[in-house]
Structures are given as structure tokens and as C-alpha cells.
Amino acid sequence: MGKSSYVLKGNVCYSKDQNTIVTYENQYLICVDGISMGVFEKIPDIYTGLKVVDYTDKLIIPGLSDLHTHAPQYAFRGLGMDHELLQWLELKTFPEEAKYADIEYAQKAYEIFADDMKTGATTRAAIFATIHVDSTILLMDLLEKTGIRAYVGKVNMDRNAPEYLLETDAEQSIQNTLRWLERCEGRYERIHPIITPRFIPTCTDELMSRLSEIQQQYQLPMQSHLSENQGEIAWVHELCPQAEFYGDAYERTGMFGGDVPTIMAHCVSSEEAEIQRMKERGVYVAHCPQSNSNLSSGIAPVYHYLEQGMNVGLGSDIAGGSSFSILRAMTDAIQVSKLRWRLQSGEGETQKPLTAAQAFYMGTKGGGSFFGKVGSFEAGYEFDAVVLDDSNLRHPQPLSVAERLERLLYLANETHVIHKYVSGESIF
Ligand code: GUN
Ligand code: FE
């Protein structure tokens, strides 16, 4: 693959800010050593020696970021969706995740996941594995070969799950985590570990506080779930009566934003105090609209989060979500926000439906910022690019580049993704 310098010619689109998508018709997007130099009408003299790749009439968008997904759940996506969260975990998810104790099963299943991640529009992801060290390393090895960049977490669970998917106690969970981190050291260029307590109900206080020590020692980011479902929230209040709210239970362990880059998936029913704490501490919200629909969790107040200037990205949350497409997540986010607005628009309701620009922002620059300067083609951003060919979506009328992009958010599938670059590397 190799990082290189080149020019892509095509219809370039990216988010300037949450309300503005900029488009450039058949212009030149310049990559030098994996970094974007910006978009130009004519190739500036200093770059005239670079190879030009001609994607005239195709669309070129920043790589998409999936801020929340579960690799071991990919195998059963679209199955067993007639439950709410806690029942679904017990009946469907935990039995499936237990299979990853078997490395041969993990090999078969994770190969499929890695192949699809390679050819989809996602260039960055934050991924949950399972509690199993060997199969988590296998997943990371397979992802490293795809060329995408990702954080992968070995999951920690030491309570409130069936014995077949539990670490025996905090000590064992910590030893497994240290063993996993040792094996990661020096092994990867593109894949990095992330501390991953599944959620408060499956992690004892002792486990959380020892994970926090590891987090500090290794300076790792963390990911978990927050305020997804009413039953889950009530359970956390019972388990942690001292916590002011669910997110406070994480903060008391030292892992809730601040110096710890943190992703919290869902935040569907966060109370205002929790929202303000997330904002103060720069916690990333991974909005997972399809999962929240499938598991009847509700509709997160994302318009509010964006208006507050909080960090928000999109997540597929496979297999709560059935599609791993972040283009699909964009339009799901728009659609559920319209239902929320229609159903809740009473007095005091100020949350308008999301716009296409806001949804595109969340899937590119908003979520991308978790990974550094990612998700835009402004000069200085890492060069993650996806080339889309919409020529089989026929139309009789003229369409602008902006209209073609909007249409693709609704209509694109993996067959429209024809080339992908990650941090300057050509993936396919
Ligand atoms: N909360 C704890 N575990 C999970 C999971 O696997 N999926 C979702 N959607 N929520 C969770
Ligand atoms: Fe999840």
C-alpha cells in the first residue's frame, strides 16, 4: 500500500462546520505524505509533478467514522430483534459472544467482518471485541491487514452475565487485560487498544477502579455504553446508589472524559445534569439511531447535543444496528429526529429535525475528530477519502454535486464505494 503523494480529480465534498457542506466540481484534491493539502481549481505549481488519479464525475468524500460497533455481533446482525436491550443481551448477544472462546469460530466470523470493513466507506472505527484475549488479538491482526484505522477493545465483564461469558472476578479480568495489552505492544501500526468496560451493570467497582489505573498507566482511551434504555438506567441507580446519575458512576472511577478520550454510546435518555457533565468533560456521544430503533431504546436528543457544541459522532452499533453503513446511519439519524420532533413537539420543544449537513458532519468531521485531524479535506487533515460512483442511480434532470451527495446518503450501498484511501494509503 505505502503512503504517497498524489492528486485526486473529482467532485469533492466535505463539511466545513455542522451546518455547511462545501462542494467542488471536478477539482483537484491534493495529498502529500498522507496529509490533505486542500482542494484547488488548478494544480498549484509546487504539486505539478504529482501523479493525478482521474475520478472525473465521481464524488470524493472524507472517510467515515463509526464511533461504536461490536465486531463479534456482526454474524447475527438482522436476527433476533424482537427484544429490548437487557433481554436481547441475555437471549441473543451473550450466547453469540461466548462462541469467541473458540478461535476457529472467531477466525471465520472476524474474517467476514474485516473483509466488509475493508470495502465499506468506513475508514475509522471504535470497536468492541469480547472478553477473550486470543480472539481479540486475532480481530486486531485481521483489521490491521485491511488498512483501516481503528481502536479495538477487549471487553471487561465480571458481574451480571451468564457464567459462560464472565471473567471470574476483577483480578482475572485485570490479568486478562494486562496480558492483552502486552501482546498488543509493538504489534500494530493502524490498530490500537482501547479500555472497554462493557457497561456499569457488568463491571464491579473494583474492576472499574483497576481499569482506570491501567488506563492511566498506558494512557489509553476508553469506550462504553451510557443511558441507552430505561431498564438499564434504573438498574445502574440500584447498583450505584451513590452516583448522581449514570454517567457519574463512570466519572467516579476516573474514566469519563477530561484527560481520558472517552466514547459513550447512545445517551438516549441522559438527564440534563449528565449532558452538562459530558459537555464539560468533552465526552464523545456515539449516536446509534438504527440500534436505538431496533431495540426500542428511543431517540437521542442529538439536535440538542450539536447545538451545545458537544462532541457527537455516529455509530452502527452492530448488531443492535443491523447495517454497518455510516451513510445509512446519517439518514437514520435524520429520519428518527423527524419522528422525535413530530411526537414531542409540544410546548418547550426546541429540538428541530437534523439536517443532511448535520448528519454528514457527524459521520465525517464530528466523529472523525476522536481519531485526530480526521474527517475533512481542509489542509492539514489526514487523508481519508472515499470515492463514490453514483452513475447507476439514473435521473432525467440535472443534479448539482450537493444534490448528488444528498441523494447518496439515502441511496448508496457498498457497491457505490469504488475506492478508499486511509491516511494516504490506497486500500482498494
Ligand atoms: N449495553 C451493554 N452491552 C451492549 C451491547 O452489546 N449492545 C448495546 N446496544 N448495548 C449494550
Ligand atoms: Fe453497543
Image: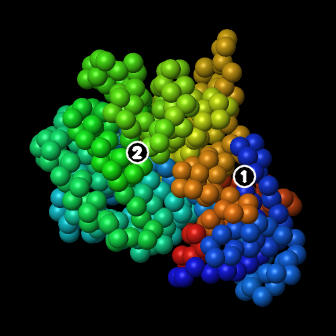
Disc 2 secondary structure class: strand
Residue 233 or residue 4, whichever sits in front? 4
Neighbours of disc 1 within 10 Å: few (<14), some (14-19), many (20+): many
- Mark 1 residue type: Ser
Q: Residue at x 54, y 46 (%)?
A: 314
Q: Residue at x 57, y 56 (%)?
A: 372
1 or 2: tag closer to the N-terminus: 1
Q: For residue 92, what is the image quadrant?
A: top left
- Mark 2 residue type: Gln
Relative image position of residue 46 (x, y in whole percent): 82, 81
- Picture layout, residue 357 above or below residue 137: above
- Picture layout, residue 158 above or below residue 269: below
Report the quarter where the C terminus lies.
bottom right
Relative image position of residue 122 (x, y in whole percent): 54, 61
Relative image position of residue 362 (x, y in whole percent): 62, 46
Q: Is residue 180 visible?
A: yes
Mark 1–mark 2 Cα distance, whole angstroms, equals: 25 Å
Position of residue 192 in the picture relative to residue 174 (left or right): right
Neighbours of disc 2 within 10 Å: few (<14), some (14-19), many (20+): many
Q: Quadrant of ligand 1?
A: top left
Q: Is residue 330 visible?
A: no
Position of residue 172 in the picture relative to residue 10 (left or right): left
For the image shown, how many numbered marks are present on the structure? 2
Q: For residue 421, what is the image quadrant?
A: bottom right
Q: Which residue is mark 2?
A: 223
Position of residue 265 in the picture relative to residue 385 (left or right): left
Q: Which residue is mark 1?
A: 15
Q: Residue at x 25, y 60 (%)?
A: 180
